[in-house]
């Protein structure tokens, strides 16, 4: 049963990551490019899309904070913090979407100035894989047989 619960959260995380309404950006985290989002964006996204909680089956009644904490515990998310915490000269405030992140020691969800990066690799659809295989063959055929 525990494995099934893990799969439910994995499925939920994939649906949320693929959803267009959750605003996310790319940044460098420990020399790796990761896709990340802000805690307040996740909270408002969950408020606007309660139907996604149905994927969680028995945990569908949990609060947004509890769902995010479960994703953190299952290593589907990691909490991050900005590397540069000072305002650059000539600017009035910190950037909304920092380009460089570091792992935050606490593994708890927070809406206030917290960033969360996805730790799993996004799966490509089958058509995309097939297209990437046939595209060079088609190009070669066009060049060889005009």
Image (cartoon, rainbow, N blue to C red):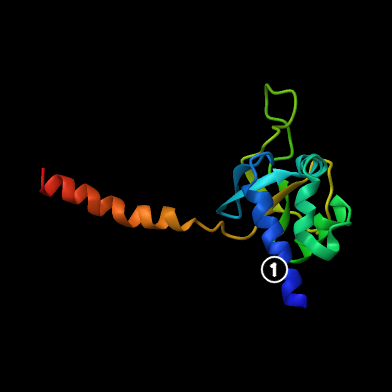
Using the image, determine if residue 130 lies above or below residue 92.
below
x 84%, y 58%: residue = 60
Using the image, determine if residue 118 lies above or below residue 88.
below
Tell which of 88 and 47 is nearer to you.
47
x 84%, y 48%: residue = 110
Mark 1: give few (<14), some (14-19) or many (20+) Cα within 10 Å. Answer: few
* Rendered image quadrant of residue 134: bottom left
Report the residue that reaches farthest toward the bottom: 1
What percent of the width, then of the height, locates residue 3? 72, 76
x 68%, y 39%: residue = 21
Tell which of 13 and 1 is nearer to you.
1
The quadrant the C terminus occupies is: top left
Disc 1 is placed on an element classified as helix
In the image, 26: left or right of 144? right
In the image, 49: left or right of 17? right
Tell which of 65 and 132 is nearer to you.
132
């Amino acid at each position: 049963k525990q494995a099934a619960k893990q799969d439910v959260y994995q499925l939920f995380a994939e649906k949320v990551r693929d959803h267009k309404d959750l605003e996310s950006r790319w940044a460098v985290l420990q020399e790796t490019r990761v896709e990340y989002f802000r805690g307040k964006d996740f909270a408002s996204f969950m408020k606007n899309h309660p139907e996604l909680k149905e994927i969680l089956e028995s945990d569908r009644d949990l609060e947004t904070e509890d769902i995010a904490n479960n994703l953190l515990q299952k290593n589907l998310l990691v909490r991050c913090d900005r590397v540069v915490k000072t305002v650059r000269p000539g600017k009035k405030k910190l950037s909304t979407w920092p380009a460089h992140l570091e792992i935050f020691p606490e593994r708890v969800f927070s809406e206030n100035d917290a960033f969360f990066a996805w730790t799993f690799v996004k799966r490509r659809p089958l058509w995309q894989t097939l297209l990437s295989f046939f595209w060079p063959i088609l190009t070669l055929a066009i060049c060889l047989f005009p």
